[in-house]
Structures are given as structure tokens and as C-alpha cells.
Amino acid sequence: MSKRPAEPPSHPAEPEIDRLAPTRRPDERPVMYQGWKHVLFLHWSLPPEVMAPLLPPGLTLDTFEGRAWVGLVPFTMRGVRPRGLPAVGFLSDFHETNVRTYVHHKGGNPGVWFFSLEAANAIAVRVARAWFKLPYHYASMELTRQDESFSYRSERRWPGPTPATCAVRCTPRGPASTSTPGTLQHFLVERYFLYSTANGVLFRGQVHHPPYQVRGANVESLDESLLAAAGIPRPPEPPLTLFSEGVDVDVFRLRCVE
């Protein structure tokens, strides 16, 4: 008797989420302007059961074909300023690195949940922790460029836990283009909502920017402990790596999520 062919593995049912609505500009005035430049996206796939317990109440893990993703994203901030004020030197230009995953709220408004954000500006760290309720940390950081390669370095100073470091060198490759809706690349990079919590209250913020022009990148070296500091086991596989020269961003006010 012939054996029945093995069926392909099934994925848990995923909600039909509108991923284009968040890309549209809100009908309101921004509270801040930022430039996100030389953005490196490093992503690893993880089982949802590993990531889901790390989320706060009210948020659901956003998955792609049944898999969760954790991102390590170093970049540099340029021209950070509140609406109505000019950019001011070291207050407006500094490096940043975040550790994040992807979430939604009751089947809508897909966004980012940050486990940590490192910034090389102590004032910006204090303001962001108070204003946007985000887990910012002050870190010594560097971003250097040699020919076509970029090197990012970060070492957390306060608050803990420590050690929490990152050192990565990469070389972008190939032509850049926008991401096609429905693809994994679009799922990972085109995120316009962020979530945060304070005193048990869930908040949602929104940004707007042109679509990222993205290309691949070769990682020549990677040494980091930021994922471990967030309680996330880093998979042994190499990360999915994407690079963008960046976007100019409008930031809108934080809202309480009912």
C-alpha cells in the first residue's frame, strides 16, 4: 500500500491586517521632525512562543507565515527637532540602535514593540523616556564609513542591564528599491506605528515618511549582546540583512490606546 504524501507544515491562522493604511500621512500636524540615516536592518526569525511572552498585555505578536521576527537596527539620527524649533548641533545629531519585534493591537494598526533603544545623547534619552514612554538607554556609540562599508559600535552606559553592546560591519550591495506590499521585506521595514507602556497604560505613536529605498548588505563581522540583555536568544543562523540610506520622518503625538 502506498503511503500518503506528507502534507506541508501549516501555519497558525494570521489575521488579515491592513498594512497600507498606516503608510498614509495622518491629517494632523507633527510634533517633531527626524532624519533616520544609514539604516541597517538585521533580522532573525524565531518561534512565536519564544517572543509572545515578552510582550505587554494588550499587544499581539505580528507574524509572517507563522514566524516571529526580532530586529537589531543601528542607524544615525540627523536634524532631530521639535516643530517650531531649529536643529541644534549635538542635540539633533546622534547615533541610535534598537532591538524590536512586530506587533498589532486587536488585529489592526501593525507596529513596532521596542525592547531597548540605545542613543548617544543623554538629553535625548531622558526626553524620550519621559515623553514617548520608550525604554531608551544612554550609550557610547560610533558610526564610521570606509569606502562602501559601514561600521556601527554601541556600548550601553545607563540604565542597565549591562553588558549590552553591539559591533557590526557591513557592505551594502545591489540596487536599492522600495518594498512590495505582501513581501517579508515590506513586513519588516515599513512600520509606521510604535507602542509603549507606562504604569500599565498602553500608548501608540505614529510616524510618516517616504517608503524606504532598500538593498541587501553583506555582514563582515557581528558581535552583540543587546538581544541577550533583552532576554531574547539569538538564533545561530546569519541574519536577514537590509540597508537603506534613510528617510526624513515626521513624528506625531503619542496617544493612549483604549
Image (spheres, rainbow, N blue to C red):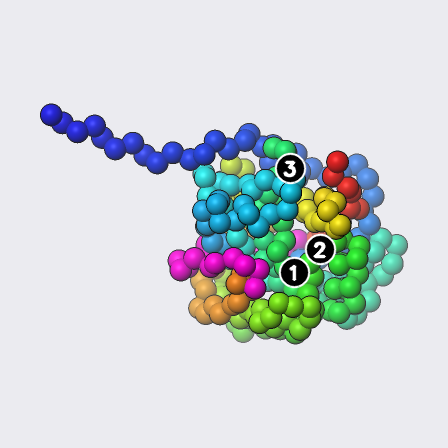
**Residue furthest toward the top?**
1
Decide if residue 211 is on the left or right side of residue 216.
right
Image x and y of residue 256, in percent: 77, 41
Relative to 216, say whether 89 is above or below: below
Tell me what residue is drawn at x 57 percent, y 60 percent: 230
Tell me what residue is drawn at x 69 percent, y 68 percent: 159
Tell me what residue is drawn at x 48 percent, y 65 percent: 171
Image quadrant where one finds the N terminus: top left
**Circle 2 is placed at which residue position?**
134
**CB under 8 Å between callouts 3 and 2?**
no
Q: State the CA–CA distance, disc 3 to disc 1.
A: 21 Å
Q: Badge 1, how many Cα within 10 Å: few under 14, some, many 20+? A: many
Check if residue 241 falls in the magenta segment: yes
The amino acid marked with disc number 1 is Leu
Image x and y of residue 202, in percent: 72, 44
As rendered, which of 205 and 84 lies closer to the eye? 205
**Circle 3 is placed at which residue position?**
105
Q: How many marks?
A: 3
Q: Secondary structure at mark 3?
A: strand
Task: State whether residue 71 appears in this view.
Answer: yes
The amino acid marked with disc number 2 is Leu
Image x and y of residue 70, in percent: 52, 52
**CB under 8 Å between callouts 1 and 2?**
yes
Q: Secondary structure at mark 2?
A: loop
The amino acid marked with disc number 3 is His
Q: State the CA–CA distance, disc 3 to disc 2.
A: 18 Å
Bounds of the magenta span?
229-247
Image x and y of residue 81, in percent: 81, 59
The quarter holding residue 10 reads top left
Check if residue 235 falls in the magenta segment: yes
**Circle 1 is placed at which residue position?**
117
